Image (cartoon, rainbow, N blue to C red):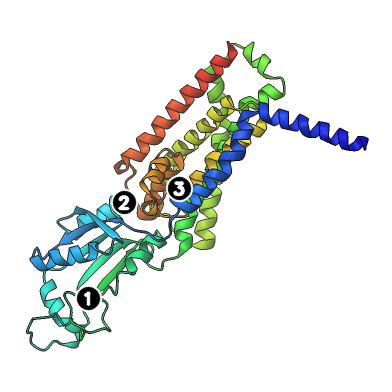
Amino acid sequence: MNFVYRIQAIFYKELMQLKRDRMTFGMVVMIPLIQLLLFGFAINTNVRHIPVGLVDQSQTALSRILVQTVSATQVVTFTHQYASVEEAQNAISKQDVRAVFIIPADVSQRLVRHGSVGFATPPATDQETSRPIAQWLTDGSDTMIAASIKGLRNMPLAELISKSANRNTPTFEVTLLYNPEQRTVVNIVPGLVAVILTMTMIMFTSAAIVREREQGNLELLINTPLKSIELMLGKIIPYIFIGLIQVTLILSLGYFIFHVPINGSMLALAGITLLFISSSLVLGLVISTIAKNQLQSMQMTVFVLLPSILLSGFMFPYEGMPRVAQIIAEALPATHFMRLIRGVALRDVEVLTMTFDLYWLAGFTLFGLLLAALRFKKRLD
C-alpha cells in the first residue's frame, strides 16, 4: 500500500502547486467559460439588423411604406440615405453599409404590374410584368450577409400586392458586388491572413521575455546598456519578416489555386499588413511581461486567440453579434485588420478612407510597445 501513499503525496503536491499558480487556475476556469459564452451567446449565424443604405428615387408615400415594410422584417436596419447609386456603391465598398436598397422612380407602376390592390392599370407587356419592384445592391464578399439579403428577394408584400400577383417574378432584384458567384473561399482567404498572423505573431513573442528568464539570459540582458524600448524593438523586428513571408504565401496560394482576386494596391496591402503584424507582436510582448512561465504565456495566447477568431468577423458576421460582443471585438487588432484587408484586397478601397481602423492599429501598437517597455523596466528594479 506504500505506492498509494506516494501517489497521494504527489497528488497533494500538485494541488498545492496549482493553488499557488493563480494564473493557471484562472485559465482553467476562464477558457471554457469564454468558449461557452462565445458560442452560446455571441455567435449568431442568423444575421439580423444588417446596416443598409437607401436610395429613394421615388420620394413618395408608397416608397416610405415599402421601406417600413422591409424594416419590419428586422433583417436590415436603414442607417444611411444616399442621393445616387454611385454614392451608395462607394459606401458599400468602404463598408459604411453592407447593402443598399434602391427604390426606382416608377415604383408605383411596378407595384401595379405585380397586382397592387385598389389600382386600375392598362395591360402590361411581358417585359414590364417581369420587372422586380426594387433592387438590392449588396456586398457579396461576405456570403452570410449576401444570403440574408437574398432571403428578401421573394419577400411577400401582403399589404401592397394582391394574392393574384405574379408569383414568377421576384419582389426584389439582388445584385451581388465583388463576389457574384458567392464563393466562400473569396471571403475566407483574406480573413485567414488575419487569423494565422494573430496565432503565430502573438505566440512567437508571448514567450520572448519568459524564455530569457527561464534560460538564465535575463541577467545578462540586464547588465547590457540596452534600454527597455530597444529590447522590445529588437524582439519584434525579426518576426516582422516572418509575418510578411506568411502573408505572401497565403495570398499567393489563394490567388493561383483558388483564384481569389487581389483588386487593391499591393503597397496599401503591405502597409496595413505591417501595421497589423506590429500590433500582434506587441500584444505578445505585453503577455510575455505578465506571464511567469512559458505555460502561462501559451494559456494567455489561447485566451486572446479564441475571441480573435470568433469575434473578428472571420467566421461569423460582425453585425450578427450582440452589442457586448461587438465592444469586445473592437478591442481586438484582428477585427480592424479583417476590415482593412478585405476592403483593400476584395473591394479595392482607398486605404486612407478607412482611417478609424488605421489609427486604432497604430495607437494599439504604440501603446502596447510603451506598456511592455514600462513593465519590463519595472521588473528590473
Label 1 to label 3: alpha-carbon separation: 36 Å
- 11 relative to 290, above or below: below
Crowding at mark 2 (Cα within 10 Å: few <14, some 14-19, many 20+)? many
Q: Amino acid at mark 3?
A: Leu
* Nearer-N-terminus badge (2/1): 2
Q: Work out whether residue 227 can be spotted.
A: no
- Residue 169, compared with residue 240, is above or below; it is below
Q: Which mark is residue 132?
A: 1
CB under 8 Å between discs 2 and 1: no
| Amino acid, disc 1 | Pro
Estimate the x, y position of residue 211 in percent, counting from the top left.
Answer: 67, 27
Tell me the quarter of the picture where residue 77 sits. Answer: bottom left
Residue at the far front in the pictured view: 1
| Residue where numbered disc 2 is placed | 95
Specify the amino acid type for callout 2. Gln
Q: Residue at x 38, y 41 (%)?
A: 327
- Give the residue at x 25% y 75%: 156
Cβ atoms at labels 3 and 2 below 8 Å apart: no
370 to the left or right of 9: left
> What residue sits 15% from the left and 77% below the top?
110
Give the residue displayed 34% in from the left and 43% down from the top: 351
Q: Which residue is mark 3?
A: 311
Q: Is residue 51 above or below residue 288?
A: below
Q: Which one is in front, 242 or 139?
A: 139
